[in-house]
Image (cartoon, rainbow, N blue to C red):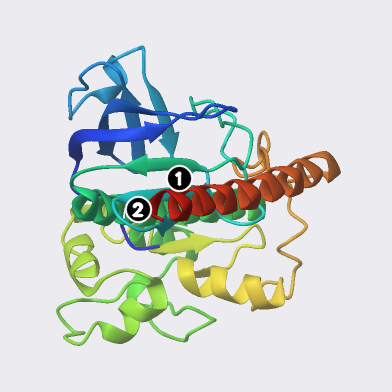
Amino acid sequence: MAKVTEPTSTAGILMKQSHGTFRHWSKRHFVLRNGCLHWSHEDLPVHRPGSVENRSFIDFSRTPCDLIVLEGSRLFLQPTHGFMWNSNDRHNSAGTAEPLMLMSEQSRELKESLREHIAFGRDLRASRMQRDRERMMGLVSVGPDDLAEELDEEAGNSTCAACLLELFPDVEENKDLSAVAAASGRSEEGISQSSSNGSRKGFGLVVKTPCQHYFHRTCLNDWVMKAGTCPVCKTNMTSQKPSHGKSSESVGSTGSTAASTVATNRSFSHRSLGWIMHRNSASAG
């Protein structure tokens, strides 16, 4: 998977609506950094918001969420349908699907920054899930030197059995890297840079399966997602056991109890949004 570009950190003041029967708005300092939203009564340093103990935060890489723009400067932030706020987050709605209502005088800037950090968090989550899948399949990253040593041949003479392109392209001989970039999931710039990093050039571009076959990382991931087997020997790649622990994405999104909780909280979320919009429309009238 291509490297994820971190969005610009943002800091400022926002208004957050409280939960409970008697709802009210309160001012909070906030920082958006590394795909996380931090807020607190106290001022937060933009580069180290985690240094403030008395703060709340949401990690967007743990929970896919949707940003809904309401009338005026109000923003409605809630988990995507079927998900809950991760229990490791620190806020009153953690472990539920209850939405957050935010408001800011710089609503346009806050909206754009939230969207960027939500997207960044989504990409981080996808990368983490891919690493989990690869660990479960028992894949090992290899470089050209590893391949040459194990196969007793030049790495440039070896091809990916899925796409039939060279496993490690020679940039000097391959001026057009678009096909290799598409197959490997790497940018052309990234492949060019990795080809000039000495004996470990190209490391991470290629993986070895437990059945001792070599593929571009993305070629194999795409193949296994569709077929579930090794493209060469048809070994079942989905039956491999994880090397340790549970998948980092298993918390809060599996099991009948969690599903029931999501459904209950989602129902509350929809009622809450309806109540808020009804109240806003009544106050406007």
> Is 108 left, or right, of 97 in this rendering?
left
Q: Specify the quadrant that holds the C terminus.
A: bottom left
Residue 264: percent from left, percent from top: 75, 44
12 or 270: nearer the viewer = 270
Q: Which residue is disc 2 drawn over?
A: 120
- Name of the residue lying farthest toward the top: 53
Residue at screen point 33% across, 71% down: 168
Residue 262 numbered mark, or none: none
Element marked by disc 2? helix
Q: Position of residue 38 (x, y in %)?
A: 33, 30
Of residues 226 and 49, which is closer to you in this image?
A: 49
Residue kind at label 2, given as amino acid type: Phe
**Residue denoted by label 1:** 61
Q: Quadrant of residue 229?
A: bottom right
- Residue 54 appears anywhere in the view: yes
Badge 1: residue crowd in 10 Å (few <14, some 14–19, many ≥20): many
Q: Which residue is drawn at 18% across and 35% down?
A: 11
Quarter of the N terminus within the rendering = bottom left
Q: Count neighbours of disc 2 (C-alpha within 10 A) and say few if under 14, some if 14 to 19, many if 20 or more.
A: many
Q: Which of marks 2 and 1 is nearer the N terminus?
A: 1
Residue at the spot 47% in from the left edge and 29% down from the top edge: 18
Question: In this rendering, is residue 178 above or below 91?
Answer: below
Residue 141 drawn at (x, y percent): 46, 54
Label 1 sits on a secondary structure element that is loop
Q: Could you tell me the amino acid type at mark 1?
A: Ser
Q: Is residue 260 left or right of residue 67?
A: right
Q: Distance between the residues labelled 2 and 1?
A: 8 Å
Which x, y percent locates residue 188?
Answer: 22, 74
Q: Do the residues labelled 2 and 1 touch (CB within 8 Å)?
A: yes
